[in-house]
Amino acid sequence: MNGIYVVILRDGCRVAPLLEIDSIFDSYAPNMIKYINAENFQQAFGFCVPMTEKEAIDCAKIIAKAYRELPDGIRILTDYRNFSFEELINGAFSKS
């Protein structure tokens, strides 16, 4: 595992341990926010239960204890907080 990632969305935060964070992104938008690869994003965070930001951070800390080494540590993704999970998996911030 490379890291534990918390994505903050309008409809709740989601937490997932990921091997490669770049797999959920396609490229950069003109405003330097990364486009979402909707299919990979759904695979990474689709099983997660939406929760508050505090619950998500606490959850990430608990999950992180299960891993010996996390090069990326715990990362919090805030750029998508104006979108719901469903909007993102339906392509709201994808390149296509």
Image (cartoon, rainbow, N blue to C red):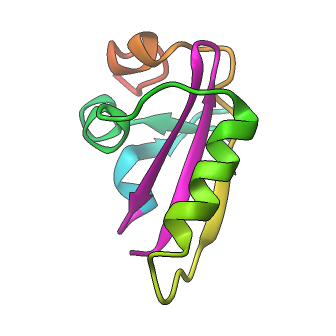
Q: Is residue 7 left or right of residue 24?
A: right
Taking the magenta stretch, the answer to whether it contains residue 22 is no
Residue 65 visible in the picture: yes
State the image coordinates of residue 89 (x, y, percent, origin top left): 34, 20
19 to 9, vertically: above or below: below
90 to 38, vertically: above or below: above
Q: Residue at x 39, y 12 (%)?
A: 86
Taking the magenta stretch, the answer to whether it contains residue 12 is yes
Nearest to the observer: residue 31 or residue 1: 1
88 to 68, vertically: above or below: above
Q: Is residue 23 left or right of residue 2?
A: left
State the image coordinates of residue 67 (x, y, percent, origin top left): 45, 80
Q: Residue at x 64, y 14 (%)?
A: 10
Q: How many labels, in total?
A: 0
Query: Taken as a whole, is the magenta stretch helix, strand or loop?
Result: strand
| Quadrant assignment, res 55 | top right
Residue 78 visible in the picture: no
Nearest to the observer: residue 41 or residue 52: 52
Nearest to the observer: residue 61 or residue 92: 61
What quarter of the picture does the N terminus occupy?
Answer: bottom left
96 to 73, vertically: above or below: above
**Residues in magenta, as a range:** 1-20
What quarter of the picture does the C terminus occupy?
Answer: top left
State the image coordinates of residue 42 (x, y, percent, origin top left): 30, 32
| Quadrant assignment, res 53 | top right
State the image coordinates of residue 23 (x, y, percent, origin top left): 34, 54
Q: Residue at x 45, y 18 (%)?
A: 85
